[in-house]
Amino acid sequence: MTDPDRTYRMTLSLNLLNHLGLNLYSNVPAVLSEVVANAWDADAEKVEIEIDTTGKITITDDGHGMSVEDANERYLLVGYERRNHEGRSETPKFKRKVMGRKGIGKLSLFSIAENIEVHSAKDGEFHGFILESDAIKEIIKEGKEEQYHPKVVSPSNIQIRKGTRIILTDVKRQLYRSSVALRQRLARRFSVIGPNHQFRVFLDEREILPEDRGYQDKIQYIWTFDERGNKIRESARNLARDEERYPGLTVNGQAFNIGGWIGTARKAGDLKLENGESLNGIVILVRGKLAQEDILEEFSEGGVYSKYIFGEIHADFLDEDDQDDIATTSRQKIFEDDPRYIALHNKLQGELRYIGNHWTDIRNEEGMKVAEQSQAIRNWLQGLNPEHRKIAQRLFGRINQLPVDSDTEKRQLFIGNILAFESLRFRHLTEQIEKIADDDLTALSRVFTQLDDLEASAYYQIIRDRLDVINKLINLVDDNAKEKAIQTHLFNHLWLLDPSWERATSTEIMERRIRSALDAASKPFTEDELYRLDIYYMTTGGKHVIIELKRAGRALRTEDLISQISKYHGEVSKVLTEADRQNERVEFVCVVGRQLQDWSNPGGRERSDNTLDGQNARVVMYDHLIDNAQAAYRDYLSKQKETERLSKLLTDISEEDFKTLSPDS
């Protein structure tokens, strides 16, 4: 039974608290990790974390618990160094290496909650107390070296009969985005979670397992340092290559080993998580608990391979009982000037350089295999001279190193490589012309035919790409897409409106001034009326073109267009006059999806055209725009697609050819 009058005392060092503050850690997973670590040190076999809809967090373990004396002399004693007390460097039941060291982890709870309620049971004794952030801060404010006495919890409210329960209320930090993300973060902060370690952790009644780290599907190549790394290797489902590395290093002449693994992903994008975080880093674990979030950021490795790297390094030698504590106060980083950390840093730097070189060789080799999966590319390579063939194969390998995850994009890069070599071939052909005798008409004819073939093929690829652009515009119009989507598409491909149009060539200052004026002129209009400025640019001939895009299904009249155009015209004229450029022409193009309503009146179309012409304006229908663009390019395509060697090659290269090789390929 518990004596409800039993007094609790938290021994405070004001200097310590002023130094640390009560915002020790920066995120919820880091704080919960401290509670889980305490449960490990208490020989717990099960830890349950529950987060209710109000944000209250409850963490319960079935460890050895605390007596009131334990609570006062250990838990509530800030700075209590457990390992300095005889027999406290290992747990009594499971002989676990104790994770805690400085005795300040409990302060981390104040980083996310204002109030901490602790219930504990040991040897039939049940008790509890409440720590209040405001009350502790008041003692600090008064500047007195005195004890803080937590509130006593009534015995009737103590529901556990073994272990410890911590209840966090008035949570002041936003809880983690989702239970899935929190589960992953907690799984990655410990290597000792799971049935194999007799230490099971549950979040909202679902067990956190080693596979929740999410590494198994992402590892393509792995380098391991010990059995812990080998276990990860065995669980990797998409593994293509592996290698065991020497784990040894020395610190001041003393030998130590590291453990764990470093891996690379098949695609750089595989390391990006749905919650916006990334696995692209190497964590340092000590005694099974995260000691540093990412040591990779400490290196200036600029190779492409660094975008694919992730891993876990175990460095237990950083936390030997007879050595100084190497962790920073926040327990999330390591002091960088410690000889042990310097030795680890140097060891990993050498390993990363080794991995970078081998990764590059492997990806080069794989890139050549990927390219040669295409029969069309194999045939093309055979047509090159041996020197050019080797260069092409090396470039295919380098393309495979780039952080490009889309098979479509990779296909375009390989095609670009082919076109570049064809350009090289073009230069060789022109050099051959200089060497051909003036009367060797057969040789000249053969070279000119090949040059024509190269030129036609290049145009063919451009036109295929442009037809893809046209098809995208068709989809935007069919979906009655909003102006912004169509605006972006047309601005990037102004040739859809007029093949002779070029991108903006006006000075940045002039364009900014005109845009500002036009934006101001568009403010009086609501979205139900005409909307805002869409595209402005200036041609090489000095003509200012303002393009108004209307949603395909919107019904409009000529007077609606004139109302907005006149506003724009007036504002642009002011800017041009101020710049002494009033003689420059301003043209307006209104792109609409439906015929203007007044066109249906007798003579309405002619009157509309005349009215718009008076404002240097004209109307373009989406359907006519698309039909004209398709006709202009398909005519050429249909004439050329059966005749050119390179055109056929580019057509035959399928996206399926660039699916990444399977591990056993």
Image: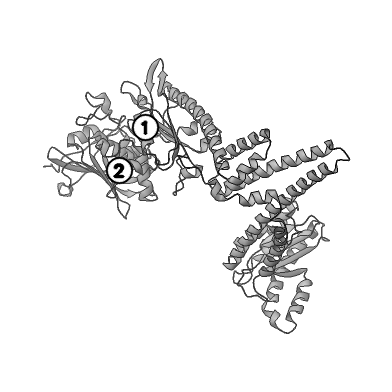
Question: What is the total number of numbered labels drawn onto the structure image?
Answer: 2
User: Looking at the image, can residue 304 be seen?
Assistant: no
Q: Which of 73 and 227 is in front in this view?
A: 227
- Numbered badge on residue 2: none
Q: Which of 101 and 374 is in front in this view?
A: 374
**Amino acid type indicated by mark 2:** Ala
Residue at 57%, 41% in the rendered image: 372
- Numbered badge on residue 135: 2
Give the answer, above or below, for where 659 lies relative to 89.
below
Q: Where is residue 643 in the image (x, y as percent from the top left)?
A: 71, 53
Left or right: 171 with respect to 164? right
Colour scheme in the image?
one colour
Cβ–Cβ under 8 Å for marks 1 and 2: no
Residue at 81%, 60% in the rendered image: 584
Left or right: 404 with respect to 513? left
Q: Where is residue 598 in the image (x, y as percent from the top left)?
A: 69, 80
Give the answer, above or below, for where 121 lies relative to 500.
above
- Numbered badge on residue 230: 1
Image quadrant assignment for residue 428 = top right
Residue at 71%, 64% in the rendered image: 631
Measure how far apart labels 1 and 2 are at the Cα level: 50 Å
Image quadrant assignment for residue 123 = top left
**Amino acid type indicated by mark 1:** Asn
The nearer-to-camera label among 1 and 2 is 1
SS at circle 1? helix
* Residue extending farthest top: 253
User: Looking at the image, can residue 352 be seen?
Assistant: yes
Q: Position of residue 260 (x, y in %)?
A: 38, 31
Q: Nearer the viewer, residue 99 or 512?
A: 99
Q: Which of marks 1 and 2 is nearer the N terminus?
A: 2
Give the answer, above or below, for where 83 lies relative to 392.
above
